[in-house]
């Protein structure tokens, strides 16, 4: 495997990791707020905060890792994305900042403050929407390079069916992934009332997810026919993804094996995400940056890969420790610790 | 005086974010070590006062960490959003420590989460204390890695430049560039100093306002001792930084010291003003001291600003930044020493109000010194963003919306600062130490009267 392929694969894995953990987190914030205003908070909010409290910072690092790594492996992305994403990027930063800090304020400081929870819930849906702009513009047609540098074409972006379908997909996926996870977590905690409630959410959000995926595909065929063509050639990958979707929903209806149901969700997104990523190549930003044109020099690439492997050796045991303490420690989940 | 063009706005936005971030970053680097020390003393002496101290510091720390993390994420993204050309160029050479920093963050975040939620989980408290070690190390590594990046901007190394194209990159050499050792040493020690001074100020204020009991006195003694030790280290590191500048970045030292002509036995100019002919007035002159500061030799030759081309000279107002930083450094050193002497000799009681007010002022002053130090270091690098290779003008974004983003981020930081203050106040006001002590360690609270006598 060439360095650039290793690099992009590693980054894509981390973006996938962020997609999963952040969706759980973002969606949970929304559900917590929703439960609060529909006066169901006594049922699920305890559960949500026990899971979220120890991990939100780790979630954020996944994101930092992705964008720092992207600029490291592909310095050209700093120039093109940096120039064009000033506004959407800044909005995303502001939302992330509001969310992270208000979460801390709410959970360590003034408990159950509705205003804080509103910030926390609303930003959870807006962040995926603003971050998805980066993926949208990577398809090409939304930026132009002039003598005065690269500029984003806001008119194109805001009037494009593709960009809106991506936003829609991002939001519903967040709610779907999160609800599916909370079902599993409630089942582990053996919390029946919470389980019934989040299960309702999970089933409700499953059909919009699959519909949004289809519309995004159709919009892609308009926006970037070549990418669409490459995706069609990888039809089997997307097929596997749909199969896992059906398995997840089936298990959810059965009311058993919630753990497996959530694993099926993870595979559903894994295949869809890697299918999307693989068909996106060779472009990182169509048509300005390709995998080979954008990659950094060899010595940096080697150094980054070495550091990455060393970092994983440090990270994986620590993550396992964290998960055993908070996610898989039955007493903790049940609220006994 | 200056126009609000894109470059100026970009610099203002970056400065604002960094000046805000560094408050929380300095606390994030320094407070874990104080927590760890307090918890350790608590375990060794079996003194719940120290354990409670560690617990309460940790609780406040969660809030500042949260703001540190989100503002750090902001500056991380802003580096690409506001300085795209710089990151494109520098990314080729200095991406390694930036990437390593994310692992340090991961490491710190994981263990911080574990530390926060496991106070009462272990039978033997030493296991809980062990969890603080990775947090201390993680914070130190974060500071180390990011500071190497900043060092690289000051003294780029580890690559060749041919016709604007970067070749023969050596990432390790770039990371361990000439500025790295002194800069890292000074940044870490000064963060420790700042954190210790802030915690000391908090203890002093409690004693002043509420006549705090044994708990606050122990807190004060621990934090002032730490302030003293870290102030010595910071001064040594600062001296080494000045020697580094004389060697590698003489124009920054010359601008900071108002040293215009190259000469032997150079005087140190302290404070003062400049008249319209750029002549120094009203200053205190310490004979030959600049030569000593720069080379450890009263007769050494120190390069003056005249040798730097006019359009590559940093602004002269950074002189005040340097002087204020150094003054605060000596203030903290002197005051903490005085306090410890009084404590030992017991000629004066330790709740001498005059000294306590001095310590209370030391916290905010230390934070100001950190800010002044950074402004001196960063503005002293002007007009370069990557010294000798790229000016700030070449590095800045050409997007026309930077001004709006400045307003947006100004509002954000105002909200974050307000929230942070409100929550911290509430947290400690509704739950004073005495109450918590009684609640958690009833047997100690009952014997509190003995401590007081
Ligand atoms: C509590 C904070 C604090 C205190 C008391 C001091 N400093 Fe400092 N100083 C810093 C906090 C700081 C800093 C924030 O850490 C800086 C900014 C950039 C850097 O490398 O460190 C810095 C920069 C800095 C530089 C520029 C380094 C460079 O640009 O590479 C010099 C020469 C000194 N300091 C020297 C001193 C001296 C001689 C001090 C005497 C006691 C001193 N500092 C006290
Ligand atoms: C341009 C310069 C800087 C950038 C790009 C930057 C980047 C970041 C980022 C991305 C984070 C969030 C990490 C997370 O998600 O957990 C962060 C937090 C942090 N930064 Fe900065 N940083 C900068 C300057 C500094 C400096 C100079 C220091 C130290 C002296 C520092 C110390 C820290 C610490 C300790 C944290 C963690 C917050 C905490 O745990 O308290 N940063 N920084
Ligand atoms: C966290 C501690 C830091 C603080 C408080 C700080 C402070 C500042 C300030 C005040 C400026 C404005 C200079 C001016 O307007 O003339 C500035 C500029 C800048 N700094 Fe730093 N700096 C820090 C660390 C870093 C680090 C570690 C990096 C590199 C990764 C960095 C990158 C920059 C950039 C890109 C600029 C804009 C160019 C310029 O105006 O010089 N800074 N910083």
Image (cartoon, grey):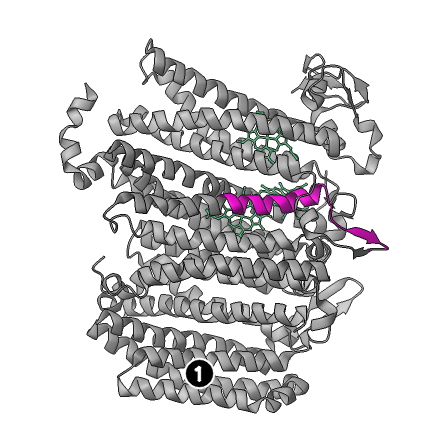
Q: Quadrant of ligand 1?
A: top right
**Which residue is located at x 85 percent, y 54 percent?**
B162
Left or right of A188? Residue A233 is right
Left or right of A122? Residue A294 is right
**View extreme (right): residue:** B163
- Mark 1 residue CB less than 8 A from any atom of ligand 2: no
Q: Quadrant of the C terminus of chain A?
A: bottom left
Crowding near the residue tagged with mark 1, few <14, some 14–19, many ≥20 C-alpha atoms within 10 Å:
many
Residue B59: percent from left, percent from top: 33, 45
Q: Can see residue A117?
A: no
Give the camera-side residue of B370 and A51.
A51
Residue placed under numbered mark 1 in the picture: A209
Region rendered in magenta: B140-164
Residue B138: percent from left, percent from top: 48, 47
Give the vertical position of A326 relative to B420 (above or below).
below
Give the vertical position of B250 relative to A270 (above or below).
above
Left or right of B391? Residue B355 is left
**Which residue is located at x 42 percent, y 84 percent?**
A208
Q: Secondary structure at mark 1?
A: helix
Q: Can see residue A276?
A: yes
Residue B46: percent from left, percent from top: 24, 34
């Amino acid at each position: 495997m060439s360095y650039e392929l290793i690099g992009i694969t590693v980054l894509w894995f981390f973006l996938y990791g962020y997609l999963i953990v952040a969706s759980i987190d973002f969606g949970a914030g929304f559900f917590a707020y929703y439960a609060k205003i529909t006066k169901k908070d006594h049922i699920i909010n305890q559960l949500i905060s026990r899971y979220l409290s120890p991990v939100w910072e780790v979630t954020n690092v996944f994101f930092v890792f992705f964008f720092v790594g992207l600029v490291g492996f592909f310095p050209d992305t700093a120039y093109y994305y940096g120039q064009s994403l000033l506004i959407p990027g800044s909005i995303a930063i502001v939302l992330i900042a509001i969310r992270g800090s208000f979460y801390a304020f709410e959970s360590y400081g003034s408990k159950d403050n509705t205003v804080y929870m509103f910030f926390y819930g609303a930003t959870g849906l807006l962040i995926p929407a603003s971050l998805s702009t980066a993926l949208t513009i990577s398809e090409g047609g939304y930026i132009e390079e002039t003598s005065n540098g690269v500029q984003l074409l806001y008119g194109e972006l805001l009037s494009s069916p593709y960009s809106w379908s991506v936003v829609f997909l991002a939001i519903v996926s967040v709610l779907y992934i999160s609800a599916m996870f909370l079902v599993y977590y409630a089942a582990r905690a053996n919390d029946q009332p919470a389980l019934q409630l989040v299960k309702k959410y999970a089933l409700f959000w499953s059909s919009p997810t699959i519909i949004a995926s289809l519309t995004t595909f159709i919009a892609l065929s308009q926006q970037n026919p070549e990418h669409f063509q490459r995706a069609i050639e990888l039809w089997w990958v997307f097929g596997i993804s749909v199969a896992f979707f059906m398995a997840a929903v089936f298990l959810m209806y059965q009311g058993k094996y919630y753990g497996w149901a959530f694993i099926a969700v993870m595979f559903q997104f894994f295949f869809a995400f890697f299918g999307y990523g693989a068909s996106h190549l060779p472009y990182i930003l169509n048509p300005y940056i390709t995998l080979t044109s954008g990659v950094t020099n060899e010595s940096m690439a080697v150094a980054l890969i070495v550091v990455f492997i060393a970092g994983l050796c440090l990270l994986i045991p620590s993550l396992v420790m964290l998960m055993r303490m908070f996610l898989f420690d039955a007493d903790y989940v049940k609220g006994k610790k | 005086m200056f126009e609000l063009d894109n470059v100026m706005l970009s610099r203002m936005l970056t400065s604002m974010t960094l000046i805000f971030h560094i408050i929380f970053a300095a606390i994030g680097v320094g407070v874990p070590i104080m927590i760890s020390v307090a918890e350790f003393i608590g375990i060794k002496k079996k003194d719940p006062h120290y354990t409670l101290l560690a617990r309460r510091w940790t609780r406040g720390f969660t809030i500042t960490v949260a703001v540190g993390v989100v503002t750090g994420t902001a500056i991380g993204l802003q580096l690409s959003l506001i300085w795209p050309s710089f990151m494109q160029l520098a990314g080729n050479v200095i991406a390694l420590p930036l990437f390593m920093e994310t692992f340090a963050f991961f490491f710190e975040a994981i263990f911080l989460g574990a530390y926060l939620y496991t106070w009462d989980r272990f039978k033997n408290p030493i296991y809980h204390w062990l969890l603080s070690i990775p947090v201390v190390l993680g914070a130190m590594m974060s500071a180390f890695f990011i500071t190497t990046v900043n060092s690289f901007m000051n003294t780029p190394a580890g690559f060749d430049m041919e016709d604007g194209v970067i070749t023969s990159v050596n990432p390790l050499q770039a990371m361990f560039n000439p500025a790295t050792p002194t800069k890292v040493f000074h940044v870490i020690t000064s963060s420790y100093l700042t954190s210790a001074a802030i915690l000391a100020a908090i203890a002093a204020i409690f004693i002043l306002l509420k006549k705090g009991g044994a708990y606050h006195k122990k807190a004060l003694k621990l934090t002032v001792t730490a302030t003293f030790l870290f102030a010595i280290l910071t001064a040594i590191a600062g001296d080494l930084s000045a020697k580094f500048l004389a060697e590698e970045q003489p124009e920054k030292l010359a601008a900071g010291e108002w040293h215009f002509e190259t000469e032997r036995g150079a005087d140190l100019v302290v404070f003062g003003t400049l008249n319209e002919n750029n002549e120094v007035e009203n200053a205190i002159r310490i004979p030959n001291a600049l030569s000593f500061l720069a080379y450890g030799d009263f007769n050494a030759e120190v390069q003056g600003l005249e040798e730097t081309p006019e359009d590559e000279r940093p602004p002269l107002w950074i002189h005040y930044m340097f002087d204020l930083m150094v003054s605060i450094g000596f203030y903290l050193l002197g005051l903490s020493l005085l306090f410890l002497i009084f404590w030992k000799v017991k000629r004066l009681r330790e709740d001498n109000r005059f000294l306590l007010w001095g310590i209370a002022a030391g916290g905010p002053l230390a934070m100001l010194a950190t800010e002044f130090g950074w402004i001196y270091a960063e503005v002293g690098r002007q007009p370069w963003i990557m010294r000798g290779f790229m000016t700030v003008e070449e590095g800045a974004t050409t997007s026309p919306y930077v001004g709006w983003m400045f307003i947006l981020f100004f509002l954000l930081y105002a909200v974050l600062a307000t929230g942070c203050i409100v929550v911290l106040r509430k947290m400690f006001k509704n739950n004073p130490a005495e109450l918590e002590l009684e609640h958690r360690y009833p047997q100690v609270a009952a014997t509190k009267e003995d401590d007081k006598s």
